[in-house]
Amino acid sequence: MWNSNARKIFFILSLSLIASLNGFAQENLIYHDIQTDAKGMIVPWYNPDNAVSFDHCINLVWNFWDKMRTDPNGLPYYMNHQVWEENFNDRRGIGGDQIQMALSAWRMLYAYSGNEAVKTNMRFMADYYLSHSLSPENAFWPDIPYPYNCLIYSGIYDGDMVIGKGYTQPDKAGSFGYELVNLYKLTDQRVYLDAAIKIANTLANHTKNGDSLHSPMPFKVHAVTGKVGTFTASISDTTSTGQSCYTSNWAPTLSLFLSLQELNAGNTKAYGDAFNKILVWMKAFPLVNNRWGPFFEDVSGWSDTQINAMTFARFIMEHPSYFPNWQKDVRGIMDWVYHDLGNNEWKKYGVLAVNEQSSFPVPGNSHTARQGADELLYCKLSGDMKNYDLALRQLIWATYMVDDDGKNRFPTIEIWLTDGYGDYARHYLRAMAAFPELAPAEDHILSSTSVVQEADYDSRFKKEIPDGETGPFSRMYYKTYDSKGVEQIRLNKKPGKVILGGRILSESANGEGYSWESLSGGGCLTIRRLKGNEVLIKY
């Protein structure tokens, strides 16, 4: 007589055999069997509802990050390493943009969730990195962060992964500076703005006009001496190909210069001049010849990367006034990505995955999700919905990289703390902002033209805003940095009242007020603020 375990094993084997004989065996994709719809197209592994699945994966990766173990030096694992290992500590230091990516994603996640632990994590990462990574004030490139901890447990970031101590990456400094401006807006802590100004001063002072082989600032440079980085004798000097002299990852730096000008903070004239030099160069070279160049710290030769190309494509879409032919420009970049970095391995499921870069043609979780989110933004802004379904399937495909416990594996290799966390969650949040029906039918701030400083989704919020009424109302509250702006909020039902700084707003399609779009399970509330930054929503 069989015991229950033997019967269970036989049952599972029988089902597998029957499925195989009938041609229905499921293909596994990293952590999960691929699920399909009636047409054989991929659907999410967790739940057939895209919104539910996207939200689930965002929460899984945040919880994994938040609960990550502490290293022997007392820091969270992600402050020391770029790759997660379950049973030992990886020998490599952090990724060059690892902290910046997390700050970018968590800023959006805080508004979406109202989870104060997200905000606390942002401040911890920024505070520690600021106090342990900056080049000396008397350096040739002063006051900018080093991207790598050459001695893993030193707690000090002091160089570059490939060419060693003393070398930095100016494009990553621009990313950090931009996130510091946003963190200032989030917290009202002047220390973040002051640090961002110093970073911007250095970058602006070193911005040149550039040419076909040299970007306005180099990819890697020795912060103290100003020597542009080359590689060790074991790796051929690649100056002729522009490896250390060239990168096109300047969209975050452009955003840094713009944001400081908007705040009228720092040397705004210098920022404007540097902005113009970079913008002219981007239009004259990468946008024309698709020579996007390197991004990643661990690649020692020339490589064209999807992240550089698509980050600039998003910048174009978010700043169309600088690009009279923005639709053609963006479409050209996206078509280049598909032609040079497209991966058809999952074509039968309707998925065109995206390879990370030309020197490493492997499909990436964050890269494919980025392509999907940016395609959705293009659909929204242009009205061209041709690639809407493709974009959804790209995002769906990338959910299969997430395990039930929040591990997020780069396909075929490792669990990178860049690709699987900061540079992953933000693409799903951006997708929801473009199309609110991709967010679950719950209360979530999906987008704001301002930084959201406070978000409380508690049904019995404790802080009172004068509104002329009393009583135990079900409600949500948020506060923004700017007193003028627009928010999109996914709600499970239409609100009874929207109150801005004590004033009841009217439902209006124009001017200050709010509008409501019905969606499955609720709808999307759009609030337009002209004067005031505290909003109370009553149901």
Image (cartoon, helix red, strand yellow):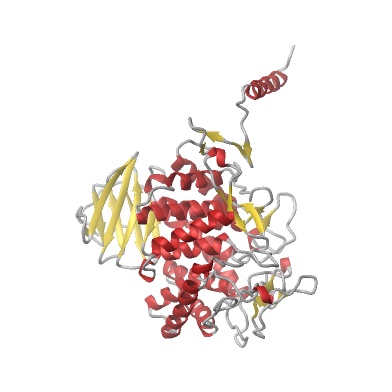
**Residue 240 placement, left or right of 367:** right
**Residue 186 placement, left or right of 488:** right
Please state the horizontal and vertical placement of residue 251, each as a whole percent of the image: 49, 69
Nearest the eye: 457 or 8: 8
Relative to 215, residue 81 above or below = above
Residue 275 appearing in the image: yes
Residue 539 appearing in the image: no
User: For the point 75% across and 53% down, which residue is it?
Assistant: 88
Q: Which residue lies furthest to the top in this view?
A: 1
Nearest the eye: 8 or 140: 140
Please state the horizontal and vertical placement of residue 96, each as a whole percent of the image: 62, 66
Q: Which residue lies furthest to the right in this view?
A: 234
Question: Which image quarter: residue 526?
Answer: bottom left
Q: Quadrant of the N terminus?
A: top right
Please state the horizontal and vertical placement of residue 94, each as a whole percent of the image: 66, 64
User: For the point 47% across and 48% down, which residue is it?
Assistant: 391
Please state the horizontal and vertical placement of residue 154, each as a whole percent of the image: 71, 70
User: For the point 50% across and 56% down, which residue is it?
Assistant: 335
Relative to 466, residue 46 above or below = above
Relative to 224, residue 152 above or below = above
Q: How many marks?
A: 0
Relative to 149, residue 272 above or below = below
Question: Which image quarter: residue 327?
Answer: bottom left
